[in-house]
Amino acid sequence: MNIRLGVVDVLTGVLLIALSADPMSTIRVIIAISLLVSAFSEWYTAVFAVRRRTLHGLLGFAWTAAAVLVAAWPGITVGVLATVLGVVMVGEGVLRMYRDRDDPDDRTALRVNGVATVLAGLALLALAVAGAAALTLTAVAVVYAARTVLAGAERLVARLSAGGRVARWARIAGPLAVTPPLVLAVLLVAVLVR
């Protein structure tokens, strides 16, 4: 399941970056789909996890509420969208840092990725506070897409490492190392295509 969710996350993030200059309605649909993928992942983990079911259920509820808000509010502004995504991302990052894992490498990877998610959420909140001059739909889409690609890469690396096919350092640094070049490459392609 992690491989499928990871691929969907990465593809959704890439699509979001590529279409970041499109109208709000297109971006809202892609973000709502991405939020629902994250919600499904957390609900799935809450049902089948051995520990911390409440934590995963809480995250699943937060992602679901954000998806409903983004999809159901036709007049949502860029500032509100940035605030909703920023709050959920900060919450996810903080909770991710405290997830319980037996493997110390997994704990380190979760903490590093949690910090990256918190920073991305804080960047969205800062954009929302900065106002109209700095806040654009493209900026919100790209920051959220980076989080989505990171989440997908983390799922893929976690699944591959479960079979012992990924080195110890790759489990910790892999998702973070993959995300920035991927985001920049997709942005470059999107700029060249337009």
Image (tube, rainbow, N blue to C red):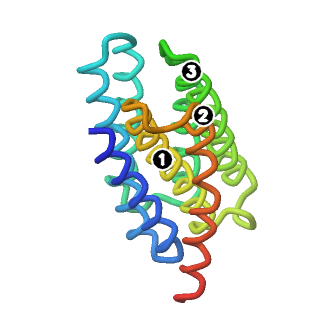
Determine whether, in the image, residue 67 is placed left or right of residue 170: left
- Graded by Cα atoms within 10 Å as few (under 14), some (14 to 19) or many (20 or more), the crowding at tag 2 reads many
Pointer 2 or 1: first along the chain: 1
Residue in the picture at 65% in, 39% down: 116
- Image quarter in which the C terminus is found: bottom right
Pointer 1 or 3: first along the chain: 3
Residue flagged by tag 2: what amino acid is it? Ile
The secondary structure type at the circle numbered 3 is: helix
List the residue tagged with mark 2.
172
Alpha carbon distance from label 3 to label 2: 9 Å
Residue flagged by tag 1: what amino acid is it? Ala
Alpha carbon distance from label 1 to label 3: 16 Å
- Seen from the viewer's position, the closer of residues 2 and 32 is 2
- Seen from the viewer's position, the closer of residues 43 and 177 is 177
- Seen from the viewer's position, the closer of residues 57 and 50 is 50
Residue in the picture at 60% in, 35% down: 113
Residue in the picture at 66% in, 52% down: 128
List the residue tagged with mark 1.
153
List the residue tagged with mark 3.
107
Pointer 3 or 2: first along the chain: 3
Name the front one of labels 2 and 1.
Answer: 2
Q: Residue 99 location, x and y as percent?
A: 50, 18
The secondary structure type at the circle numbered 2 is: helix
Q: Is residue 28 above or below residue 1?
A: below
